[in-house]
Amino acid sequence: MASFDGLLLMVLTYGALALAAWAFIDALVRPASGFMAAGKLTKPGWVAITGIAIAVVYFFGLMSFFGLPAIIAAIVYLVDVRPAVRGLKRGNSW
């Protein structure tokens, strides 16, 4: 039977993977011009950062030297970049 600590770490790791995957997919579907208009890093930059975050958490784990900064990067995307890019209008202004 799994211990409580192991089960908690597994739930946190899968939650972190889901969070990073959400950030990655959201960065993929947003228009590239929105990132520039919002004054943020480019779309390929955020796609790469969030994709690397998924890989780091998957291969190294959440509680590793690289795992925590990877999740922080995904959280920064979701909290700062996503609202700025999402708030912009799409297409023509008329």
Image: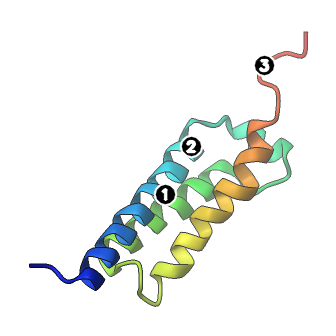
Q: Residues within 10 Å of mark 1 (few under 14, many from 20)?
A: some
Residue type highlighted by circle 2: Asp
Residue depicted at 33% across the width and 78% down the height: 9
Tell which of 69 and 12 is nearer to you.
12
Examine the rendered structure and indicate whether residue 39 appears above or below residue 7.
above
Residue extending farthest bottom: 65
State the colouring used for the structure image. rainbow
Q: Residues within 10 Å of mark 3 (few under 14, many from 20)?
A: few
Q: Earlier in the sequence, mark 1 or mark 3?
A: 1
Which residue in the protein does label 3 denote? Answer: 91
Which residue in the protein does label 1 denote? Answer: 19
Residue depicted at 52% across the width and 73% down the height: 70
Looking at the rendered image, the disc whose residue lies closer to the viewer, 2 or 3, is 2
Q: Earlier in the sequence, mark 2 or mark 3?
A: 2
Which residue in the protein does label 2 denote? Answer: 26
Residue extending farthest top: 94
Looking at the rendered image, the disc whose residue lies closer to the viewer, 2 or 1, is 1
Q: Is residue 39 left or right of residue 60?
A: right
Examine the rendered structure and indicate whether residue 71 appears above or below residue 69.
above
Examine the rendered structure and indicate whether residue 30 appears above or below residue 64.
above
> Which part of the image, by quadrant, shows the N terminus?
bottom left
Residue type highlighted by circle 3: Gly
Residue 49 location in percent, x, y?
Answer: 56, 64
Q: Earlier in the sequence, mark 2 or mark 1?
A: 1
Distance between the alpha carbons at the discs numbered 2 and 1: 11 Å
Q: Are marks 1 and 3 in contact (CB under 8 Å)?
A: no
Residue depicted at 35% across the width and 79% down the height: 61
SS at mark 1 in the image: helix
